[in-house]
Amino acid sequence: MRIYCEKDYDAMSRRAACVIAAQVVSKPDCVLGLATGSSPVGTYKQLIQWHKQGDLSFREVRSVNLDEYYGLAPDHDQSYRYFMQANLFDHVDIVPENTNVPDGLAKDPAAECARYEQVAADLGYADLQLLGMGRNGHIGFNEPCAEFPLATHLVDLTESTIEANARFFASADDVPRQALTMGIGTIMKARKILVVVSGADKADAVLKAFAGPITPEVPASILQLHPDVTLVGDESALSKLTGAKG
Ligand code: GLP
């Protein structure tokens, strides 16, 4: 695992954007696994800037997002489809048809999960999967549980996640209780994984995920078994991980 310890959120974002740009430049038609949340926003901003300068094109890139709230329409301002449009897709030259996010309004969530898993499989899974991490160690919306879920599935969100994400909604009551998420198996099939973490409130999760036992109680801990992980964090998020180097 490569670890980049950067001084703050902006430096973390630039470093993560470098890793993604390197992927896109070396394989213009790559499959990017994309993530939402506040962690990757700065990374996307940097990518947009390089695109606007004419240094980076997403014309041939295909993308597959990790997850979506169940029950939110794509044009709901807290849906992950909306997030991706607002924070990346609408500002770069990616072809809209080449972007994939689970359908939060699917009538039959099991069928939608099967369809989405097939979309990922047909793309050959991600060349590079970008991940944020929840404070409880969740990746995508794979919450702590008894077994690592393999494929895309419908998940009940934990109270801790609902509480953490309530800041984006009018109140905690408005946070959807369920989500469609790629499974841990889907994520682990990516050829490369890039994790971005910032802030002191992630320090415990980082420590447990990368220096603790591999357990579905800390979903991100499975990443210790992946052969190509790059962890990019700011100093506060990596403060408990000894040996982190800039
Ligand atoms: C959400 C997303 C995750 C994300 C996590 C952390 O629950 N499903 O993909 O990594 O939140 O979010 P943030 O980066 O805002 O801390």
Image (cartoon, grey):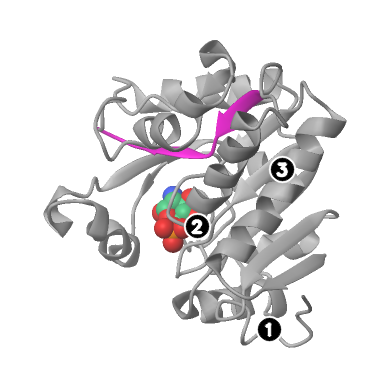
The verdict on label 2 being within 8 Å of ligand 1 is: yes
Residue shown at 59% from the left, 46% from the top: 46
Is residue 142 visible in the rendered image? The answer is no
**First-in-chain label (2 vs 1):** 2
Residue shown at 50% from the left, 57% from the top: 39
Residues under labels 1 and 3: Cα distance?
Answer: 24 Å
**How many circles with numbers are drawn on the protein?**
3
Q: Nearer the viewer, residue 208 or 22?
A: 22
Tell me the SS state at disc 2. loop
Magenta stretch bounds:
62-71
**First-in-chain label (1 vs 3):** 3
- Would you name the residue on which mark 1 appears? 241
Measured from the top left, where is residue 31 in percent x and y?
A: 71, 28
- Height in image: 187 above or below 210? above
**First-in-chain label (3 vs 2):** 3
Q: Residues within 10 Å of mark 1 (few under 14, many from 20)?
A: some
Residues under labels 3 and 2: Cα distance?
Answer: 15 Å
The verdict on label 3 being within 8 Å of ligand 1 is: no
Q: Amino acid at mark 1?
A: Leu
Magenta stretch: helix, strand or loop mostly: strand
- Would you name the residue on which mark 2 appears? 39
Residue shown at 47% from the left, 63% from the top: 134
- Would you name the residue on which mark 3 appears? 20
Q: Residues within 10 Å of mark 2 (few under 14, many from 20)?
A: many
- Height in image: 186 above or below 6? above
Tell me the SS state at disc 1. loop
